[in-house]
Image (tube, rainbow, N blue to C red):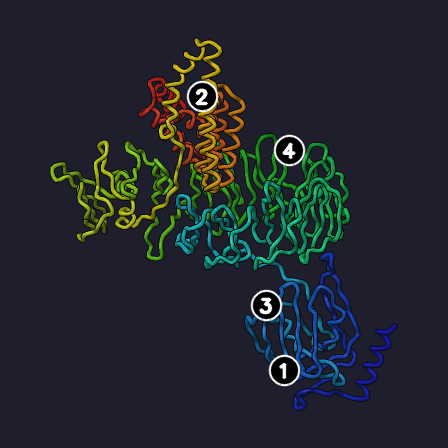
Amino acid sequence: MKRIVWLCLAALLLCSFPVMAADAGASVNVIEKGQIVTVSLNEYGEEQSQTDANAFVEKDGIAMVPSFVFGRLKNALSHTYDEKTGAIRFYDSGKELFYELKVGSDQVTVLDRNKTKQSGFTLSTAISLHLVGDYPCYPLDFFQKIGYGASFDGSRTITLDFRPKPAAAESDEPKLVPFSMGTKHGYMDESGTVAIEPEFDGAEPFSEGMAAVASEGKWGYIDATGKVVIMPRYDSVTAFSDGMAAVGIDMNGEWKFGYIDKTGKPMRDFDYDYALPFREGYALAAKGSTFAVINKSGTNLVYKSHDDAGPYSEGLAKVGRGDKYGFLNKRGEEQIPLQFEAGGDFSEGLAAVRSNGKWGYIGKDGTFAIEARFDHAGPFAEALAAVKIGDKYGFVDKSGQTAISPRFDAVGSFHNGYAPAMSANKWGYIDAKGDWAVQPAYDFAYGTAGSLFSVREGSRTIYLDAKGAEVRPRDKGGNEYVLVLVAGKVIEVNGRLLDLEVPPAVVQGSTLVPVRPILESLGLKLDWDPTAQTIKAVRQGLSVELQIDNPTARVNGANVALAVAPVIWNGSTLVPVRFISESAGAKVDYAPYRPVSLYEMGMHDAWSDFDGWAEEYNNADRATQIDMESKLQAEFNELDAMYRTAFSQAPDNDAAYMEYAVLLGELAQMFGSDELWDESAKMAASAARLNGDNAHYYMLYVADRTATEAEAIEQYRDAAEADPYLVLNHAAANGTYLDAAAAFGEMNGMKEFAVYCLKQAVRLGTAEAKEQAQTLLRGKYGM
């Protein structure tokens, strides 16, 4: 009732006082019977539209929006006006931006949430006072320039659309893809030109202009220039979605999750047990078995007790309770009741659900659009959905008709016109007709990355162009990146393990590597002059000459000083790896291996002495045995005190904890003591807290000492999944190549590692190991 009275009073005043304007020279037309339509989203993300009869003015042909409109908006722009100074400020909570304006001016200043100036722009006309002089009025292009819809029909209606625009389309994303060089990760464009150097321990694809990267065990985010925007401090991260990322922190073994924006600002405390990505302005996050629907301000809109949930997609989120699934709207209401056996997210208007053991597709009214007749069903993408019939996969269209016959062993969703597909245990890509665009020849296919096809071959992730050719990283001069990875006793060049007869060695602080296999892998042809003891290596544009015991090399005719002169070791010439980097243009990375040496600890001598000690102990009388036990206990107490002192003096010395763990393990085996094994495990856990690699060192150590063959292979596989180079080095140090080969042989894409271990077993193993390795090479690998 008050609004009607107010509007009538405003109209009456307009009749009495035509217009008061800040710029009196302008041509002003009063639209007395106008109307203003505002469209926005309510707190549940639902569209709301309001039409009000409002007088407004048209100045110099430009429709002006009176400021009193903003009093009726929710979840959109807020507005303040200082009548004394004419200063105006808008705040956009969705974008976290301020806009400063002033009556009589056509300038707008844009500030961030900290009220720091970011930019500015000019309006089509100045802000002016109209409608009895009380209300600032704004030209329509103000709203257009800050990213909202604003239009005037030229007669009597202004329409303002304050619904947030969707996130940038993929076509607007940086055309950068992650790549790895050894243990380091960077980004290259679709031509292979490196845009961000490989300096991170992990790298994920870009999303909304940000990419997650890892450094020293923690995750953060960079922008498309490689600048670290959010420092690595999280243990778990997701890609940015809807302007937010779900991140997790390991709090002494208890995981907690929360959300951050693109500046790294937390939405609220990290108090969720699980957090799903933001979609369409909302997310589901769990505490225990209870999921909350939350908005970007961190407000819990509604709680429902569900055992399972998915992110919002097209206004609905999959939820499950017990053995039934349905869909939740943003009010927290079960819009589609829990009635299905399983379900997927809505995509392109349909969601896959299972009923009576078969999969089909429902619309948002919960009724079947495609009957449940499939053995499995995936989401629609590019109007096609993957379905399983029997043991084969194909695709159907939205009418449920077969678009691609089911003849594949596995498939992924379509993206950019192509879908990953597997046949005969190998992956490739098919087009929308079901024809092979990339032949199935790879261990896995991840999906398209822009115009590239992403596949895994062995341990390497590589990219293929439209012709199926590998796109290799190159510098801005067009030269191919070459990485020499020195992983303990193993060397890998651009993802290929080198078959070395002599491993790398450290001499006077420099890492020396066998020169022939590395330079040959880089495309150089080598000649050896035994008289002069020189090596000459050449390829187009590069000539290298080295001489044994000479600390000066020649590269393209110029002298180059070496940190250490080349040496001959067991028939192979070794040179500083840094020289290869500097002369051949290769990059060098290191994956160090630091095993505990039982020889250095003297434990092998202890083992040889133990038989004599045990025989003496068994033949002694009880008094002598007690005396021997007492002396042994005293020696152990002294040893334990020594280590405890070392721990107190250097609590961060993980090597000391690991050394004592292995020593206790050896003693536990000697005396068959479960108590000593327990102490050994505690020491290893302390070492692992300081350096995660120690958990795998200890796992392999225990596997070698106590596990059955099947258990050992399983433990080797677990360690290899975390770090395959660690397993290679452990095998080299302990002669367990057959166990390592068996573990790698069970892993997808690790054939090269398995073959490498078998070849090493043939070269270095016992007669029995050589025979087993040769049998496997011939039978399983056809070599």
Query: 644 or 768: which is nearer to us?
Result: 644
The answer to whether the residues at label 3 and label 2 have Cβ atoms under 8 Å apart is: no
Say if 731 sits above or below 400 in the image.
Answer: above
The answer to whether the residues at label 1 and label 4 have Cβ atoms under 8 Å apart is: no
Residue 12, given in percent of the width and then of the height, sits at 83, 84
Q: Secondary structure at mark 4?
A: loop
Task: State the residue at coordinates (79%, 88%).
Answer: 17
Q: Secondary structure at mark 2?
A: helix
Q: Which residue is mark 3?
A: 112
Q: Residues within 10 Å of mark 1 (few under 14, many from 20)?
A: many
Residue at mark 4 to residue at mark 2: CA–CA distance = 70 Å
Q: Type of residue at label 1?
A: Ala
Q: Secondary structure at mark 1?
A: loop
Say if 357 sits above or below 238 in the image.
Answer: above
Q: Type of residue at label 3?
A: Asp
The answer to whether the residues at label 1 and label 3 have Cβ atoms under 8 Å apart is: no
Say if 76 sits above or below 345 in the image.
Answer: below
Q: Type of residue at label 4?
A: Asp
- Visible in this render: residue 778? no
Q: Which residue is mark 4?
A: 375
Residue at mark 1 to residue at mark 2: CA–CA distance = 96 Å
Q: Secondary structure at mark 3?
A: loop
Q: Residues within 10 Å of mark 3 (few under 14, many from 20)?
A: some
Q: Which residue is mark 1?
A: 126
Q: Which residue is mark 2?
A: 631
Task: State the residue at coordinates (79%, 79%).
Answer: 33
Mark 1 vs mark 3: give the one in front. 3
Q: Residues within 10 Å of mark 2 (few under 14, many from 20)?
A: few
Q: Quadrant of the C terminus?
A: top left
N-term mark: 1 or 2: 1
